[in-house]
Amino acid sequence: MFNALHPTASGTRFNISYEFFPPKTAEMEAQLWASVKRLEALKPHFVSVTYGAGGSTRERTHAIVARIARETSMKPAAHLTCVSSSKEDIDDILNAYWDAVVRHIVALRGDPPSGVGTTFEPNPKGYATSSDLVRGIRRLHDFEISVSTYPEGHPESRSIEQDLDALEAKIDAGATRAITQFFFDNDVYFKFLDKARARRIAIPIVPGIMPIRNFKQVANFAAKAGASVPRWIAERFEGLDEDPETRALVAAATAVEQVMGLARAGVEEFHFYTNNRADMVFAICHLLGVRPLREKVDA
Ligand code: FAD
């Protein structure tokens, strides 16, 4: 079905990464670690942990990332934003990661503290843009640095060209991988990729895949995040508000369709927004051929 395999972390031609967020309750914490354990078996390239809006999860993000580094075989990546932090604060956070043997940062500007849609006012002693942050990280330690990118344009951008300018600035500052905002129409991604490659942007632009567990929530989030929800996706979830079981099956089928479409077109890297749950992404990876290595059983 696919081209000849070449080895990646997963043992297939695919490089997979998973994103988690810092949970708020003990119950959600248990779910996070159960998911981390289950997905570890698939040998992801890396796993990332988000940083709460306004830096609200500074300690919790650090604790989870450091525990993944300490207790699992996976390489963690810590999300970090410029919001509300001075350059000195950022240096402290980075030094703590370096000491915890964390070597990968997902560097972001972050949303304006006064809310999405308002003007971003940087901390007077902090970094003003994501590219400034990347430069600051690069200056301090030899971290691997991933950044975001927006195939449909960041809500504050006037054009896709402006997003590509921003991506180029981040690469010039030292970023080596871009992870996309989620999207549901693969053509959006292919067009963006064509524009990026036409500009000689050569770093991996890894599609961010968001399984739609809760359509209303995802649609609300998409409206703020610079992602469109095609009409045909909305139609698939119509009438399922009170039917979580069917919704989960439709969500899995929709995500599988999207990922297989990308894979057929030659995409070999995927970043999954897991919502701290393993089941759906585990199944998608299974279909991609990314599976736990079987232990050799002696006869
Ligand atoms: P940027 O690429 O910095 O773009 C933001 C705006 O600034 C754009 O309009 C862009 O054109 C402009 N711009 C960029 N660089 C420059 C420059 N050098 N000069 C002038 N203008 C510039 N948010 C969190 O709070 N925590 C997270 O953990 C988190 N993780 C994310 C992970 C991914 C993969 C993605 C796609 C988003 C994530 N976000 C997170 C959301 C993100 O913080 C917001 O979308 C934020 O509004 C923009 O930050 P950015 O670094 O993604 O965007």
Image: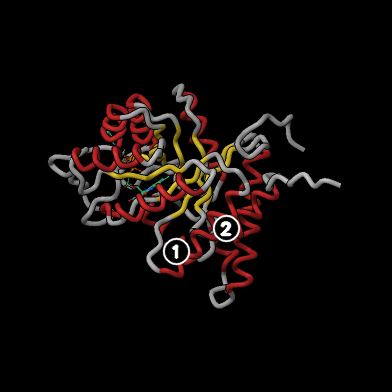
Residue 177 image point, x, y percent: 45, 33
Q: In what element is the residue under mark 2?
A: loop
The amino acid beneath tag 2 is Ala
Q: Which mark is residue 235?
A: none
Of circles 2 and 1, the one toward us is 1
C-alpha distance separating marks 2 and 1: 13 Å
Q: Which residue is pictured at 22% across the width and 46% down the height?
A: 120
- Residue at 24% of width from left, 37% of height from top? 91
Vertical order, 115 against 137 (above or below) = below
Q: Quadrant of residue 248?
A: bottom right
Circle 2 is placed at which residue position? 278
- The residue positioned 45% from the left and 64% from the top of the image is 29
Amino acid identity at mark 1: Glu
> Is residue 168 among what the camera can see?
no
Report whether 248 appears left or right of 228: right
User: Image point 65% across, 44% down: which residue?
Assistant: 261
Residue 171 location, quadrant? top left
Of 121 and 287, the residue lying toward us: 287
* Circle 1 residue: 29
